[in-house]
Image (cartoon, helix red, strand yellow):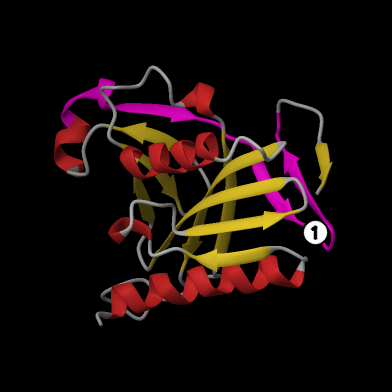
Amino acid sequence: MTLRKQRGFKFEYHIVEMLRNRGFNAKKSGGNTVGFPDIIATRHYTLLGIEAKSVAGFHAYIPLDQIQRCFQLLEMFNLYQNRYAIAAFKFMSKVTGNDFRRPIKYYYFLMEERFFEHIEQFKYLRCVYNGELAFITELDESLRKKRKNNVLPVKLPYVTFNNNDITFDTNWLVQKKLTV
């Protein structure tokens, strides 16, 4: 197994443990190989579909087809009153290719389907080390610099996992607390 895959598995297991400690029944699903989100978790009337990415660089990417799988899973289980798709990002302390160290950063974002409905031209959700999000059309940095319409900045609500609750916190909305 490559170091890159190990890093991703460790992050997924970290999220599963964090959710289990908060009373969720959480499982790593197998992600791409089975066509489900990386992590599926339930508690009472709540279902979570989580896509997780762990990187040693400054940018993390989730292909939009993986995000669509989260929404498809949520649609399948409409018996759950609360259904949420979450994008989880971990930025490692050591940057790939050098000895530069930085603080580890974790970001959790609530993905609302309305943000993803009319963006067919975009292929990825990109998260930067400072927490900024954008939809992008391609991964090649040089092509993105040439064409300005390849990047669409977006703000998604932050997700905080408290002891018993999940909190969705946004800069432009009042903090919403959900008891699950």
Examine the structure image and report whether residue 178 is included in the region drawn in magenta.
no
Q: What residue type is labelled 1?
A: Asn
Q: Position of residue 123 (x, y in %)?
A: 27, 34
Name above or below for residue 12 compared with residue 151.
Answer: below
The residue that appears at 61% across and 49% down in the rendered structure is 48
The image quarter in which residue 170 lies:
top right
As drawn, is 111 to the left or to the right of 1? right
**Residue receiving disc 1:** 162
What stretch of residues is rendered in magenta? 146-171
Q: Residue 100, can we see it?
A: no
Q: Which of 152 and 52 is in front in this view?
A: 52
The image quarter in which residue 20 lies:
bottom right
Q: Residues within 10 Å of mark 1 (few under 14, many from 20)?
A: few
The residue that appears at 77% across and 66% down in the rendered structure is 22
As drawn, is 171 to the left or to the right of 29? right
Examine the structure image and report whether residue 158 is included in the region drawn in magenta.
yes
Name above or below for residue 35 compared with residue 93.
Answer: above
